[in-house]
Image: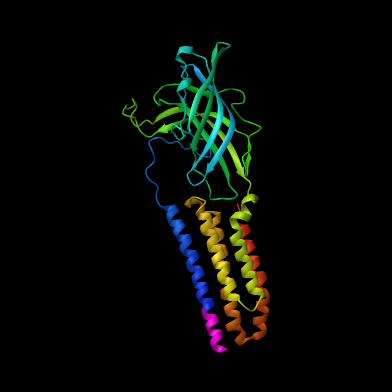
Amino acid sequence: MKDVSVVSRRRRLWMALAALAFALTLQIGFWRAAATPEPAPPAVDWGRPEAPAASPPLRQPTLPPLQLGAYITNVNDIDLLNDQFSIELLLWTIWQGDPDQNPSDQLRILNGVYNGDTQRFERIRRDQINGSSWSLYTVRSPVVKRWQLQRYPFDDQLLHVQIGLEDPLQPVNLDVVPNDPSTVSPGLLLPAWILKSPTGYASSISLMSDLGRPMAEAGAVRRQPTVSFDLPIQRRSLLFVAPDFLGYMLAVGLCCMSLLITRSRDDLILAAVVSAGGNYVFIAGQLPVTAMTGFIGTLQMIIFLGILYVVAADELIDNQLSLVNARFARALRVLLLPSYVGMTLLGIWWIIP
């Protein structure tokens, strides 16, 4: 019996070390990958900060205004791994200058993905209304989006579309229409997301190059006028908790069972390690590596530290304290389960955004 007890104690110690090593290896690997410096920025900054830019949008007040409005009809193909989504909208323009010089046909989605199969920017109608040239376009395009997933699955995202002239050097006075510059079709449904009120505003992008034509002022940054349309969306978090974190829930349940029974504890703890590790690998295959450094990575550490706590406390109580003071050891064992559950729930509650 003594030999069996020694073997069992060694098995628990080895499982504890394996669990800790596995957790640290996964977590450090993802942290290092997320911390790897990104390549040099592209020539054109297509991104948009979550807060409005500090510098005012570029205007050409001497030119006739070109006003834009958008009616969003569809959003789909939200691709978290490839950093993009697809959008379809009706875009209209109002040009108050010479109809023969109307630049509306040169508009493009500047942060879109260009290929002949998926992007469309077609004019379907043009009329003269109250002395202005009104044009209507159908627009469909994949759009580049740098997802912010550190709070996943409690995250909010901003679908940002930036429209400007195809020629970045052509002067233009871009703005939005004064009334309702951006609206969403009532029939637009985005599964697992809550749609919020869209916005439209005049903006600009910085060109990190002089494009071979140096500016008159040394050190000046060339800016291209644009119009931006934003659609905030909020993830329905509860729809992702059960399918994405089932392995973590199972690991906690197995740890609780190991504290309630006297047999097969080692097998239950090993199953908890495999369940938690498998859950982490599953999520890592669904999300970019940057998401693993936020809520998900911290949750993984809490789960594995909880497993280590169960193994270490069980080993200490059964094989150390019980030999010194059996009554005190029994009292600690009664507190082991509620302390594990309490610390795990407190840790999870603490990290929920």
Name the residue furthest top: 131
- Magenta residues span 1-10
Question: Quick check: 217 left or right of 84?
Answer: left
Instruction: Place residue 169 in its image quadrant.
Output: top left
Q: Tell me if residue 98 can be seen.
A: no
Residue beneath the point at 46% across and 63% down: 25
Dividing the picture into quadrants, the one containing residue 233 is: top right
| Residue 113 to residue 149: above or below | above
**Residue ID at (47%, 21%):** 105
Q: Residue at x 50, y 18 (%)?
A: 65
Q: Position of residue 167 (x, y in %)?
A: 40, 25
Magenta stretch containing residue 195, yes or no? no
Looking at the rendering, in which quadrant would you find the N terminus?
bottom right
The location of residue 71, given as percent across then percent down, is 59, 28
Image vertical order of residue 33 relative to residue 259, above or below: above
Say whether residue 25 is visible. Answer: yes
Residue 242 spot, x, y in % from top left: 63, 55
- Image height of 39 relative to 87, above or below: below
Quadrant assignment, res 218: top left
- 309 is higher (above) or lower (below) than 29: below
Q: Main secondary structure of the magenta part?
A: helix
Report the side of 147 relative to 241 (left or right): left
Q: Is residue 9 magenta?
A: yes
Relative image position of residue 67 (x, y in whole percent): 53, 21
